[in-house]
Image (cartoon, grey):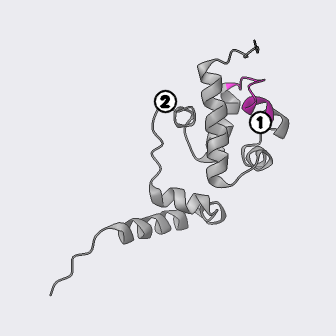
Amino acid sequence: MPVIPVVDAFDFNLQVRLKSLRGQLGWNQSKLAKESGVTPAAINMIESGKRVPTVAVMQRISAAFGLTVSELIGEVKISESDCERFYRKFGVLDQISGKDQEILLYLANRLRRPRHVDH
């Protein structure tokens, strides 16, 4: 009979969430490490369940994804809009100023609204 390691629900959820979020952004562990300021070895150990991150590390990883810690661990639904996910996925938001990000998101949201045309 195989031995199945016991994984705490929190740890498993975090492992799955990190891999999923990285995948959505097209990031590898090295990219997440660079963006979060957490070492690649630590990211690997967290994702493999060999290490439980401290609150400070959770905050750094969350910030790299643009999430709160609660959103990262799945306690609350990620509040990011489809527009924000699109821009983040393609790396656009990371390369422009905060004000320009707001303008782009505003324009994207305006384009999504149905238009009423007077005839």
In the image, taking residue 118 as reference, residue 109 lies left or right, namely right
Asked if the stretch drawn in magenta spans residue 93, the answer is no
User: Image quadrant for the N terminus?
Assistant: top right
Q: Residue at x 60, y 22 (%)?
A: 10
Report which quarter residue 117 is drawn in. Answer: bottom left
- Give whichever of 104, 91 is nearer the camera: 91
52, above or below 93, in the image: above
User: Image quadrant for the C terminus?
Assistant: bottom left
Q: Residue at x 62, y 39 (%)?
A: 62
Which element type, helix, strand or loop, lies under badge 1? helix
In the image, taking residue 13 as reference, residue 78 lies left or right, namely left
Q: How packed is label 1: few (under 14 Cα within 10 Å), some, or many (20 or more)?
A: many
Locate residue 9, reporting x and y percent. 59, 20
Q: Which mark is residue 75?
A: 2
Q: Given the image, on which type of amino acid does mark 1 rest?
A: Ile
66, above or below 3, in the image: below
Q: Residue at x 76, y 50 (%)?
A: 31
User: Residue farthest to the right?
Assistant: 41
In the image, taking residue 58 as reference, residue 2 lies left or right, namely right
Q: From where the camera sits, is residue 98 visible?
A: no
Q: Which residues are magenta?
A: 43-54
Which element type, helix, strand or loop, lies under badge 2? loop
Q: From where the camera sits, is residue 76 visible?
A: yes
Locate residue 111, reporting x and y percent. 38, 72
Q: Residue at x 80, y 47 (%)?
A: 30
User: Residue farthest to the left?
Assistant: 119
According to the picture, the residue beneath numbered tag 1 turns out to be 43
Q: Given the image, on which type of amino acid does mark 2 rest?
A: Glu
109, above or below 41, in the image: below
